[in-house]
Image (cartoon, coloured by chain):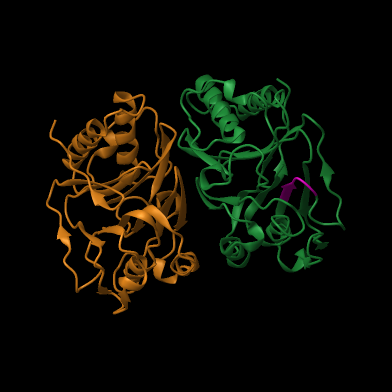
Chain colours: A green, B orange
Amino acid sequence: MCELLGMSANVPTDICFSFTGLVQRGGRTGPHSDGWGISLYEGRGSRSFHDPRPSVASEIAELIQRYAIKSKIIISHIRKANRGKICLENTHPFTRELWSCSWVFAHNGQLNGIKIKRLKFYQPIGTTDSEHAFCWMLDQIRKKYPKRPANSQQLWRYIHKLAEEVSKLGVFSFLMSDSYYLYVYCTNNMCWITRRHPFGKARLIDTGEIVDFRKLTTPKDIVTIVTSRALTDNEEWHHMKKGEFVVFKDGKQQKIKLN
Amino acid sequence: MCELLGMSANVPTDICFSFTGLVQRGGRTGPHSDGWGISLYEGRGSRSFHDPRPSVASEIAELIQRYAIKSKIIISHIRKANRGKICLENTHPFTRELWSCSWVFAHNGQLNGIKIKRLKFYQPIGTTDSEHAFCWMLDQIRKKYPKRPANSQQLWRYIHKLAEEVSKLGVFSFLMSDSYYLYVYCTNNMCWITRRHPFGKARLIDTGEIVDFRKLTTPKDIVTIVTSRALTDNEEWHHMKKGEFVVFKDGKQQKIKLN
């Protein structure tokens, strides 16, 4: 299994504090030492940093913690390989273009038989079940919506439906973004927290480090962090249920209408 | 205009020396301070580092010089914006997937009217003429060859033909790779050098730094560096002609048959 970390915020925000917690699990406080990656959006573009080496020993991970790149949407992943060897092309997050948007995807879980699902437009570069599932979902979205639907609710419901179909094959907890929204689906082990005014202090489980968000934020800031396992032990995290699908924009959970 | 740097080698090789020369031109010895990027292949996968800030002042560029990631194919670019604002999505190299391969592209030049060429499968995320040209070439390749042709010569001739067509619109010097080959097309300002046994010393024009390749190589190594302007002043660079197309694999120039 792997661990996921995502962020949605209403102002460009760095993820240094949470990422510092996550990277510990890539070889020190956790066994996820088979590579890691992070994708950060700036406007419609995204940039990714990938390293097939353990995050806890990665110079690139160290740079991300220090350099504090600010973004409104971030997706990160640390890997414990179960399907697909340890190599760059199997390192999440995966990226593809659809509707002139950069789509980013990272997955925690195992899917049995996903590779039977035939692909048309998008093909995986590596050999993971995760990238195959991502390509299949984008294929379906592209087929149904050659252009981005004007009504986002339609798109959200369709992504939810696709996620449900893939999740029949196993564990399919994922983070995905199209540069506008952060999409979160949970089979197991997903939780999130929204931090907003009045901000307080938070303590990282993995390092004991304490940060006082009052010193780093303005009263208007809204920042949601999504992760596989809670990163702090003095805050209330929302634990997602099996089959739950959540969409965030600007740090705020979006209301998904049933039809 | 911009500057390009590419590498093709028969063993995983770092590009620290050449890259150090290039980044000086991103704000110190050259005016190309509107962002930079580098893509490095490892097997079929590639990873990219992008920064919309000047390379000479970039912490990420500093890491690339220090961290010495080894690769057999590298493409790098420093940008002087002429079309498209300075932002992440306009920062080369651009990446797309075709035939389960990661294709990477970086361009130097300006193309007038490229956006009239209609796109089907691949759409640009940013607003540069470069990314549009890349998407158009991949569209054409995909249309003609839904699967990778068994005969690489066919593909090379077709890429050459596409490059000639695009170059009618202006200056179209580019580096491109599909993870197997490094493709180089020249409208102007492209030169290359192949270093092999017996290796010697090289002196960087932009910093005066001298490296003794005898200490860093084995007699079997073959490394080709392609760039917009020669990086060293004590070696013989091959200056490409207008309309010339060259393909490299494992550091060696490939013979392109006319039909």
Please tell me which residue is depicted at 55% across the width and 25% down the height of the picture.
A141
Q: Judge whether B36 appears above or below B174 on screen.
A: below
Residue A98 on image: x %, y %: 48, 33
Q: Judge whether B197 appears above or below B210 on screen.
A: above
Seen from the viewer's position, the closer of residues A216 and A41 is A41
Outermost residue toward the front in this view: B219
Relative placement, left or right, of B44 versus B188 is right
Q: Total of numbered circles in the picture?
A: 0
Figure quadrant of the N terminus of chain A? top right
Residue B7 shown in magenta: no
> Residue A103 appears in which quarter of the rendering?
top right
Seen from the viewer's position, the closer of residues B74 and A160 is B74
Relative placement, left or right, of A151 versus B72 is right
Question: What secondary structure is the magenta-colored segment mainly?
Answer: strand
Query: Magenta region: which residues?
Result: A224-229
Q: Judge whether B88 appears above or below B117 on screen.
A: below
Residue A39 on image: x %, y %: 57, 49
Q: Is residue A137 visible?
A: yes
Residue A225 shown in magenta: yes
Please tell me which residue is depicted at 55% across the width and 41% down the height of the picture.
A94
Residue A160 on image: x %, y %: 68, 27
Residue A100 on image: x %, y %: 45, 36
Figure quadrant of the C terminus of chain A? top right
Seen from the viewer's position, the closer of residues B135 and A107 is A107
Q: Is residue B74 visible?
A: no
Please tell me which residue is depicted at 77% across the width and 66% down the height of the picture.
A211
> Residue B247 appears in which quarter of the rendering?
top left
Relative placement, left or right, of A7 versus A131 is right
